[in-house]
Amino acid sequence: MLEPNRLAWLAAQHPKREAVFFRERWYTYGELYQRARRAAGALRALGVGRGDRVGLLAQNHLAYLDLLFTGPLLGSILTPFNHRLSLPELQALHAYTEPRVLLYGEGFREAALALDPKALPVEALEEGEEAQEKVRVGLEDPALLLFTGGTTGLPKGALIPYRQLLVNALETAAAWGLSREDRYILATPMFHAALNALATPLLFLGGQVVVEERFRAEEYLELTRRFRPTLLFLVPTMFQMLLEAGAWEGIDLSFVRFAISGGAPCPAPVREAFRKKGVRFRQGYGLTECGVNCFAFELAEAEAYPESVGRPMPHLRARLVREDGKEAALGEAGELWLSGGVVMKGYFRRPEENEKVFAWDGQRLWLKTGDLAYRDEGGRFFIVGRRKEMFISGGENVYPVEVERALYDHPAVKEAAVVGVPDPRWGEVGVAFVALRPGEALEAEALKAFLRERLAGYKVPKHVVFLEELPKTGPGKVNKEALKRLWEEGHGEA
């Protein structure tokens, strides 16, 4: 989101500047502000006021931005729902957040009405009379309620204040060298972190955003050809899908300044394919509760250390904490703790969860990310996986991310994920779930032999399961809980 009055300023200074492309037309900064005022009028007529949640169930849509920019005018809180969830899951989240109004996009009418019989189509936002900017929101007021990408239990709602969005926009713009001349295609889900990963920093600067309603590799490449984005931001699975698209070989990417891989490390073969087209890569790191962009470094160093996420943003502090509470030494893995202006206010109506995730050391409030990382002598951070994903095999710590990187080095591997499972002899062992590239064939023992050349023996998965495709969460990450369930249900091993 923009700092509360930033959109009004941009609309006044650059009313005719093209800001957002959606459904075959550009919307200017002036039009975005007019839309926000109309949406505020429509919501006010429905009884929405300060602190009220406004739910949205839709594919990527201009309505996400309408509701985000409406917040400073009403004090309302955009609460986007993951449209990929089942109806019972959505009902639980709706009951948890109790939105005053629920809006839905094309294709979600039935589900929305099942959640709230008074739910309205997003077009209702365009029917209001323009509201004046009467409500004054502060930087600590919540702008967004974003659900965590958890794979077990009910997702928690992270309250994202204007302060977090403003600091993220400023820090991202400075650390990544963004300007108003930059443009990108927003193709990752707007119900998750896509809003404040690159969209809000670019709109803060006066840049341009092209909204793709649902990611399709061929369509994305066509949008790339038409609009010549200077930045690419996707999760690894999406980058992989671009390589498999028919238009990939002929696509020109000479105008791209750099690409950012979010959500998980991007496999080396994928980075290499983009490098051959002149695209330089940065590895992103962030989480819903903090940011969403937490680390950065210069492109040349990012290319020299492709597995590193870089160093903390200028006004973000990072610690690595061992299980015993002591600071981790150089090269030693510890849980990543973060402190700074991009930390959330807390989880909505979850005080017990806030106690688990926050730590006060007498000077600073720290967010425990749950991610394990180590730091090298150059101050560069390397993420080695989730704390809960690490497993101990024969007394040795195994970090699945390290094994997955080795798996991706095999030319036949398209997707890979490693989870730990109980073993009577070793305590726990690894199971590698692998999807192969089209037309490739690979035996489990051959893959294990390949890994033994790259990893210590205890890190090599005992079991290999081949799947056509790995299950994903809403944000596009591999769903490891689903893989564990798959194993427990007795799927074959090799």
Image (cartoon, rainbow, N blue to C red):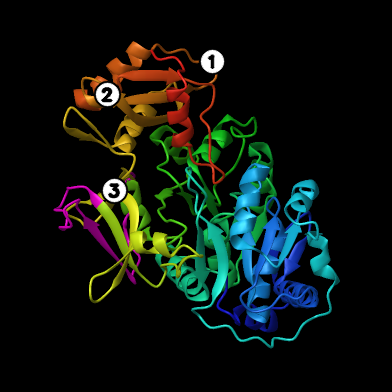
Q: Could you say whether the residue bearing mark 2 is in a helix, strand or loop?
A: loop
Extent of the magenta region:
306-334
Image depth: mark 1 or mark 3 in front: 3
Q: Residue at x 58, y 60 (%)?
A: 195
**Dividing the image into 4 quarters, which one contains the C terminus?**
top left
- Lower sequence index among marks 1 and 3: 3
**Which residue is denoted by mark 2 in the rendering?**
460
Q: Could you say whether the residue bearing mark 3 is in a helix, strand or loop?
A: strand
Residue 82 visible in the snapshot: no
Q: CA distance from mark 1 to mark 2?
A: 25 Å
**Which residue is denoted by mark 1 in the rendering?**
439
The answer to if 333 sits in the magenta stretch is yes
Q: Residue at x 39, y 63 (%)?
A: 354
**Which residue is denoted by mark 3 in the rendering?**
372
Q: CA distance from mark 1 to mark 3?
A: 36 Å
The answer to if 204 sits in the magenta stretch is no
Q: Position of residue 261 (x, y in %)?
A: 46, 47
- Lower sequence index among marks 3 and 2: 3
Query: Label 3 crowding class (10 Å Cα cut-off): few <14, some 14-19, many 20+?
Result: many
